[in-house]
Amino acid sequence: MGVFYKHFDKPIEYYFNRTGPGTNTFNILNTDEARAFGGELDAVLASLDPPAGHDQRQRARTLVQDYRREWLREQWPTWYDVPDERERVEFALGLIAAFQDGPQTLGQIPALLDQLADHFFNTLGERNALTLARYLFQVRGLKGAEPDYWLPQNSNLRAVIEGGRGIPISLALVYGLVGRRLGYAVTACNWPNHFLATALHNGERIVIDCFRGGHCVEADKFLNLQGPSREAARLQLEEDASPETIMARVLKNLVRQYQYIEHFPNAQLMVDLLKDLERRQSSPAKR
């Protein structure tokens, strides 16, 4: 008996040909559009009657992953030419999120950041860079991803905002990108081994550890802990990491994250994107 099912919201069709128990065959038609399903694929497969088996699900996931890697390779160079630095890093982070969640989600990160900024702006009480940290990491409950630190979604800003868990750089970027929407003097600090944020408050630089509940400490106290490296540390704190520096660190994390879950094709893709970024940084004319 043949069973035909079409998912009308996306330009893709599934066809199951059932010839006996355990002998379902699974084909995807219009495969050029397979990537449009994104995170909805599992739900669509679960809704089919007869249901898709393990092999069919694996085939569908493999196909979608292949198309997403192809899509990201094609789209990756587009972020280099975005003129505004904030928009450039948001667009690059959006490409990573869309690779994980499906290209139909591209463009959602700015709206999510806008919502956080609007919600904070409409809260009662004092509003400044320090109360923003309290709002995001205590009231909203964004926090460090423990024990699942090395899962790839922790580098996906869309997943971090919606799921409330991230690694130091992704949480610091949420804080910084929301803060800049509100006009606060916040910077992204490419601190070795643990990305930080800083903010100017009443003329004083404050160091913010977004991974640890938005813990704030005066820069002078932080620098006193650095010993002979104090001057180098001061320069590091005062430097606002560029979009290229940020994305290089994001990609390095993703390489390790995909290796951690043994998804080596995706790890290799991140290596390739990192090499492309480093090549363009060494030859600015290629941008």
Image (spheres, helix red, strand yellow):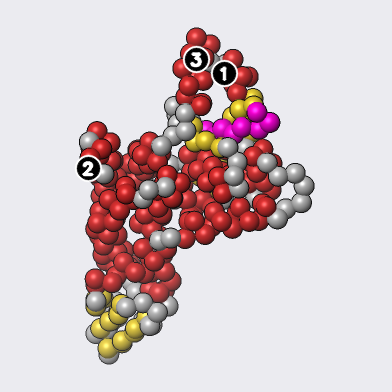
Residue type at mark 2: give it: Lys
Query: Mark 3 or mark 2, which is nearer to you?
Result: 2
Name above or below for residue 54 compared with residue 261. Answer: below
Quadrant for the N terminus in the image: bottom left
Q: Which residues are magenta?
A: 195-203
Q: Is residue 269 visible?
A: yes
Q: Please name the residue that numbered disc 1 is placed on.
A: 223
Which secondary structure dominates the residues rendered in magenta?
strand
Mark identifier at residue 231: 3
Residue type at mark 3: give it: Glu
Quadrant for the C terminus in the image: top left
Name above or below for residue 14 compared with residue 222. Answer: below
Q: Find out whether residue 120 is within the magenta segment.
A: no
Q: Secondary structure at mark 3?
A: helix
Q: Give neighbour class at mark 1: few <14, some 14-19, many 20+ (Cα, 10 Å).
A: some
Q: Secondary structure at mark 2?
A: helix
Residue in the picture at 63% in, 19% down: 221
Quarter-of-image position of residue 100 = bottom left
Q: Is residue 179 left or right of residue 96?
A: right
Q: Earlier in the sequence, mark 1 or mark 2?
A: 1
Give me the C-alpha separation between circle 1 and circle 2.
38 Å
Q: Is residue 183 left or right of residue 240?
A: right
Q: Are marks 3 and 2 in contact (CB under 8 Å)?
A: no
Q: Earlier in the sequence, mark 3 or mark 2?
A: 3
Q: Earlier in the sequence, mark 3 or mark 1?
A: 1
Give me the C-alpha separation between circle 3 and circle 2.
34 Å
